[in-house]
Image (cartoon, helix red, strand yellow):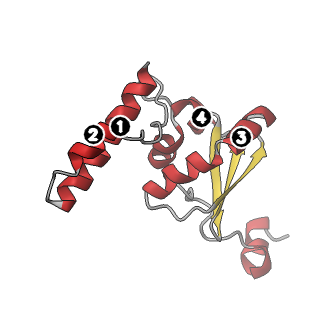
Amino acid sequence: MDKLDTILGQTKAIRPPGNLGSPPVSERDWEEAVGSRVARRTQPLRLERGVLYVRVANAAWANELSLLADDILAQLSARDLAVETLRFSVGTISRSQATRHHGPPKKAPPPDAELPDQLKAQMNDIADGSLKEALAAAAAKTLALQNDDE
């Protein structure tokens, strides 16, 4: 009798894909994109043709995350990840994913805030275009964080 691994090794049609062991998104990128609370209850499985397949703990999480898909996609895009669509399926989250916790829970940053008209007017006085753009971006992020804390 031959051992099963010997038989499987000889059969090319049954071989698993080569990328099976590596996650499609690093744990760090995923946690930064969705926040610690969500990351503990989800697990990116594979990325195929721009579709990121994500396992979630239950149907409620699948529903909630599908409503937040645009924000998650924006966060992944900001990390140069080529994800165009998310697909969620309910299943068991691996132990390492579920128990991972690095300090207080993190949440995804809020979307940039709209700059007040008065600030926009003051920004127009800045001659250097790249400086103006950098300051506007920093102000939008700061205002968003301040609004999120309230």
* Secondary structure of the residue carrying numbered label 2: helix
- Measured Cα–Cα span from mark 2 to mark 1: 5 Å
Residue 64, given in percent of the width and then of the height, sits at: 71, 36
* Secondary structure of the residue carrying numbered label 1: loop
82 or 127, nearer to the observer: 127
Going from the N terminus, do you reach mark 4 or mark 3 first?
4
Residue at the spot of label 2: 119
Amino acid found under the numbered disc labelled 3: Val
- Identify the residue at the far right of this view: 1
Residue at the spot of label 1: 116
100 left or right of 67 in image: left
Going from the N terminus, do you reach mark 1 or mark 3 first?
3
Q: Please say if the residues under marks 2 and 1 sit with CB atoms less than 8 Å apart.
A: yes
Does residue 22 lie above or below 60 as drawn?
A: below
Amino acid found under the numbered disc labelled 2: Leu
Residue at the spot of label 3: 56
Amino acid found under the numbered disc labelled 4: Val
- Measured Cα–Cα span from mark 1 to mark 3: 39 Å
- Measured Cα–Cα span from mark 4 to mark 2: 35 Å
Does residue 21 lie above or below 13 as drawn?
A: above
29 or 108, nearer to the observer: 108
Depth check, mark 4 against mark 1: the one in front is 1
Q: At 56% from the left edge and 59% from the top edge, which residue is drawn? A: 24
Going from the N terminus, do you reach mark 4 or mark 2 first?
4
* Secondary structure of the residue carrying numbered label 3: strand
141 left or right of 109 in image: left
Residue at the spot of label 4: 38
